[in-house]
Image (cartoon, rainbow, N blue to C red):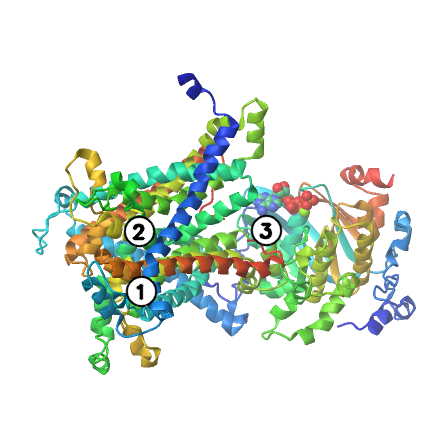
């Protein structure tokens, strides 16, 4: 850490006789801020700041490196394609094909529900937003949803979807009680996790559209609705995708809703075709990792590591997708977008 | 008919449709509060204010609920949730405090002091840490940190010293706080860095031009002015910490035990279970009515916690507005 | 700290002319007793009122062959200038000619811009500014910016900021108060804010904010004061206050002022430097540059103003 500070006494510039003037002069060390003049508390703080920065790097590289090592050590291609078996012996407990499909299904359902609602809400708030108090209340409402723990959403989903009118989303018992746990119900609750992210990204995009773009469209005689459809939505497409990718990352990584609302079962219910699967329970990679960790019943660390590695790849992939989308969108619009840390 | 559909939407219809969809968000919140409150009512009704107190072993009470069957008596609702509430507060406050310090330092580093190449490395790392699913954090916690703590940090003597009260196995408060801190720090860093970037350069330049070093200028001007953004980050991260269920249930030992600070260092190694973790662990038995009411009661409390945080952050921003600090 | 008595003594022309070197006579203003004195001044006859000056004071800063680059773009080209105590150097020139850049180089603020690079030498009292620890340099060479940039704190905290941050201990408010009041008085702002020093600085008017920034710089006790268009946001009355302040300060400080207002440059500038596209075109005593410019470009630029 200390080595990054320039030396306190600068070397005098090297002067060679006969050196041609012109051209770049010899680089000179400047007497920059020397922390030796700082107050003691500031110096301690400065040191701690470096420590914190390097610790972030160390933790990040540590986690990724560790998961990569463990993942590559235990991940076999066959794990991705074989069904899980209920067996305590790790060599017989099969792969995690079903959880993988579960993750994909749940993510798709969740984002498919979240995106239209989030975009509609963002469009309404930015383009109409009247009455103002309602817009503000809805804005805060989305903040509240964003701050609601996933486990609370899961319990809410359970009581909500056990109501009779949602019977078609899951199974009914003989006595008519609705089970409430299925891909559809879990996906619906997952959409609430993704919704704030899609909403925020869309709203940011809409607010960044300059007023003259709208005015030009109105000037051509287009109605407001047509302007939204033909001008605004296309121009915030990349924002919507960014938000959606972020939201999908969150859905794929969520466990609590899967455990409570999807049943966290090992296998999908293949009866009744695709809709039957959606009505049935299942698990995802997250619940698979949870159940195979020492905290769950499985206690199969190797399987847990392998599945966690795949999960991590999916989540990181979605995050890289965010970057790619943002970059493409920026090129299309000719705007520099700055994400975290960009100045 | 088709013609009518093909007709461009009238403004009015578009506005109403979009507005209705937007309002569905409010409907969801209203239903959420209503449903959870209704389900939670039997538990509060049976226990009154003593719900929030410590009365006996909370784990035994929950077990009794599972065994009470489909038609529990009022006595079966008996619950003193204080150890769970206390565990939630303890993990949340400790990890939020650690994360605040940690993230503030790291954000200042990123924004002002990091060499360019390190900054290029650290920014994606922060985003990656924010994206790692909690179950992965939990997995690393339980397979790496817990054995380390249980095996190397807790001496046999320490284990014996409390063996009649609680078993120390490594799953503990300290692991929960450490992992939770790592989980929520990236959220705070992201918000703080954004906030620091949005402060006009001219303020920092003005301070630096007066001969104040960059470190002091950062703290006295930029960080001060970015307090609303920092507060927002704290609130978001705290909300995440309160509700974290999976990771905590994996690494914290899952005991309805209230770690006692009077135990000195041992305090850090004692197991606990937060409300969120309780919900996720006992959700299998949620069909037992008494258990159901108890879990929904905890969910209501978590929901209320989120509300209090939002209001708190809003209040905290108010006095700053006077000095032109934007939110 | 300058007490009022001392200030009057220092400003008294008789007393000073008796001490050998002829100092610039300065009109006495006493902001604290008669705050409305400034507008009574006939602004159109400014040049006739501008105090004649005597020999220049000691040379505080020397700019020697200074070039500043933003990436490949050369914003200041091979400029050499002296900055003397006891006189005001006014920088004029069309927009974008590098005045701000030149000024910011003098206390090494350009180093905050990653793309900026500098060549040539600048000395402060004979020491290369690169050899002075940068915060110490900036404490001695203070700057007032083109855009008022008061901190989002109270008026008092703004002015006290530099004092609080300088030492190794934070002085109490009681100790700071006289310094803050003095700085505010010198910047001609005290009367307007005296009733409430805890007023948020960002709620002041633009002109008040700029004077607050001047007060903030003065409170730090600089030796050289760099002012980048300090009056661009000000009304004539506040401008007059600032100009009086500049004339008053120039004995104890070396002042460099950038201005687009040629009359102002003429009123306050003992020496005037005209820059054009990064080049220093002409550097001459104010009277000479405005009445009898040597370079054609200068003539074109100032020509329309003084006929
Ligand atoms: N941060 C920067 N990066 C790149 N180029 C810059 C930067 N700052 C200034 N420049 C360029 O340097 C030149 C000089 O700018 P400077 O701000 O010094 O002009 P100025 O004389 O102060 O103008 P004005 O009278 O409008 O304030 C300009 O052409 C400008 O484009
Ligand atoms: Mg300028």
Per the image, the residue denoted by label 3 is: C119
Question: Would you identify the image quadrant in which residue C75 lies?
Answer: top right
Q: Position of residue B168 (x, y in %)?
A: 22, 74
Q: Position of residue C69 (x, y in %)?
A: 58, 46
Q: CA distance from mark 1 to mark 2?
A: 17 Å
Q: Nearer the viewer, mark 1 or mark 2?
A: 2
Q: Position of residue A24 (x, y in %)?
A: 54, 48
- For this rendering, which residue is in front, A249 or C97? A249
Dot 3: few (<14), some (14–19), or many (≥20) neighbours within 10 Å? some
Q: Residue at x 46, y 61 (%)?
A: B104
Per the image, the residue denoted by label 2 is: A154
Q: CA distance from mark 1 to mark 3?
A: 63 Å
Per the image, the residue denoted by label 1 is: B274
- For this rendering, which residue is in front, A297 or B229? A297
Q: CA distance from mark 2 to mark 3?
A: 65 Å
Secondary structure of residue under mark 3? strand
Host chain of mark 2: A
Host chain of mark 3: C
Q: Position of residue A21 (x, y in %)?
A: 58, 49
Does the residue tagged 1 have its C-beta within 8 Å of any atom of ligand 1?
no
Secondary structure of residue under mark 1? loop
The answer to whether residue B281 shows anywhere in this view is no
Host chain of mark 1: B
């Amino acid at each position: 850490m200390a080595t990054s500070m320039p030396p306190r006494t600068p070397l005098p510039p090297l002067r060679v006789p006969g050196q041609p003037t012109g051209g770049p002069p010899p680089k000179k060390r400047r007497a920059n801020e020397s922390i030796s003049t700082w107050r003691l508390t500031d110096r301690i703080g400065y040191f701690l700041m470096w420590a914190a920065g390097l610790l972030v790097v160390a933790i990040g590289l540590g986690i990724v490196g560790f998961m990569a090592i463990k993942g590559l050590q235990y991940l076999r291609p066959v794990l991705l394609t074989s069904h899980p078996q209920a067996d305590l012996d790790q060599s017989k407990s099969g792969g995690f094909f079903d959880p993988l499909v579960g993750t994909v299904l749940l993510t798709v359902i969740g984002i498919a529900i979240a995106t239209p609602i989030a975009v509609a809400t963002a469009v309404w708030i930015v383009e109409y937003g009247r009455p103002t108090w309602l817009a503000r209340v809805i804005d805060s409402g989305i903040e509240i949803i964003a701050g609601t723990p996933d486990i609370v959403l899961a319990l809410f989903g359970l009581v909500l979807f056990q109501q009779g009118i949602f019977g078609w989303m899951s199974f009914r018992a003989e006595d008519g009680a609705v089970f409430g746990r299925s891909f559809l119900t879990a996906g619906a609750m997952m959409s609430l996790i993704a919704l704030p992210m899609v909403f925020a990204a869309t709203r940011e995009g809409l607010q960044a559209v300059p007023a003259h773009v709208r005015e030009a469209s109105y000037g051509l005689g287009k109605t407001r609705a047509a302007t939204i459809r033909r001008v605004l939505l296309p121009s915030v497409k990349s924002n919507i995708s960014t938000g959606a990718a972020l939201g999908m990352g969150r859905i794929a990584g969520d466990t609590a809703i899967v455990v409570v609302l999807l049943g966290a079962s090992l296998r999908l219910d293949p009866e009744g075709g695709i809709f039957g699967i959606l009505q049935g329970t299942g698990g995802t990679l997250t619940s698979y990792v949870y159940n195979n960790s020492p905290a769950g019943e499985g206690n199969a660390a190797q399987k847990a590591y392998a599945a966690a590695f795949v999960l991590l790849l999916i989540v990181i992939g979605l995050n890289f997708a965010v970057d790619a989308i943002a970059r493409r969108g920026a090129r299309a619009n000719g705007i520099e977008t700055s994400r975290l840390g960009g100045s | 008919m088709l013609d009518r559909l093909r007709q461009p939407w009238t403004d009015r219809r578009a506005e109403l449709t979009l507005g209705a969809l937007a309002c569905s968000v409010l409907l969801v919140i209203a239903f959420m509060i209503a449903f959870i409150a209704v389900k939670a009512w039997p538990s509060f009704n049976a226990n009154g204010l003593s719900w929030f107190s410590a009365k006996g072993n909370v784990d035994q009470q929950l077990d009794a609920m599972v065994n009470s069957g489909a038609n529990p008596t009022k006595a079966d609702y008996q619950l003193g949730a204080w150890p769970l509430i206390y565990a939630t507060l303890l993990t949340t406050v400790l990890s939020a405090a650690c994360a605040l310090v940690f993230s503030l330092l790291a954000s200042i580093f990123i924004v002002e002091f990091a060499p360019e190449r390190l900054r290029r490395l650290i920014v994606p790392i922060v985003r990656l840490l924010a994206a790692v699913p909690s179950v992965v954090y939990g997995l690393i916690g339980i397979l790496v940190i817990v054995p380390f703590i249980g095996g190397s940090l807790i001496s046999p003597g320490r284990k014996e010293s409390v063996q009649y009260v609680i078993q120390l196995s490594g799953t503990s408060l300290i692991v929960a706080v450490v992992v939770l801190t790592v989980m929520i720090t990236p959220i705070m860093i992201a918000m703080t860095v954004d906030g620091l970037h949005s402060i006009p350069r001219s303020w920092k330049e003005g301070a630096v031009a007066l001969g104040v070093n960059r470190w002091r200028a950062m703290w006295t001007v930029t960080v001060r002015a970015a307090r609303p953004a920092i507060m927002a980050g704290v609130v978001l991260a705290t909300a995440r910490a309160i509700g974290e269920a999976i990771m905590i249930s994996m690494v914290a030992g899952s005991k309805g035990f209230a770690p006692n600070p009077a135990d000195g260092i041992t305090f850090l190694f004692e197991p606990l279970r937060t409300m969120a973790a309780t919900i996720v662990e006992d959700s299998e038995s949620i069909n037992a009515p008494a258990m159901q009411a108890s879990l929904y009661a905890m969910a209501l409390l978590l929901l209320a916690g989120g509300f209090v945080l939002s209001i708190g952050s809003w209040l905290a921003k108010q006095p700053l507005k006077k000095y032109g600090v934007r939110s | 700290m300058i007490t009022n008595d001392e200030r009057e003594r220092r400003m008294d022309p008789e007393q000073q002319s008796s001490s050998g070197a002829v100092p610039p006579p300065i009109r006495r203003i006493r902001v604290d007793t008669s705050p409305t004195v400034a507008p009574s001044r006939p602004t159109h006859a400014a040049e006739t009122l501008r105090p004649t000056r005597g020999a220049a004071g000691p040379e505080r800063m020397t700019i020697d062959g200074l070039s500043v680059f933003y990436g490949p773009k050369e914003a200041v080209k091979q400029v050499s200038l002296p900055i003397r105590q006891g006189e005001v150097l006014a920088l004029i020139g069309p927009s974008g000619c590098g005045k701000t850049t030149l000024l910011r180089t003098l206390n090494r603020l350009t180093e905050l811009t990653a793309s900026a690079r500098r060549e040539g030498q600048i000395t402060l009292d004979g020491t290369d500014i690169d050899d002075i620890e940068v915060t110490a340099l900036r404490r001695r060479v203070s700057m007032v910016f083109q855009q008022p940039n008061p901190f989002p704190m109270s008026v008092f905290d703004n002015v006290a900021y530099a004092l609080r941050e300088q030492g190794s201990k934070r002085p109490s408010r009681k100790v700071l108060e006289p310094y803050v009041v003095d700085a505010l008085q010198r910047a001609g702002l005290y009367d307007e804010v005296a009733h409430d020093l805890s007023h948020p600085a960002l709620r002041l008017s633009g002109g008040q904010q700029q004077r607050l920034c001047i007060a903030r710089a003065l409170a730090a006790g600089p030796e050289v004061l760099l002012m980048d268009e300090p009056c661009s946001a000000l009304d004539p009355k506040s401008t007059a206050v600032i100009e009086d302040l500049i004339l008053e300060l120039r004995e104890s400080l070396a002042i460099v002022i950038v201005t687009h207002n040629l009359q102002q440059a003429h009123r306050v500038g003992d020496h005037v430097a005209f820059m054009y596209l990064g080049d220093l075109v002409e550097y001459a005593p104010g009277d000479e540059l405005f009445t009898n410019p040597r370079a054609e470009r200068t003539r074109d630029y100032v020509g329309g103003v003084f006929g």
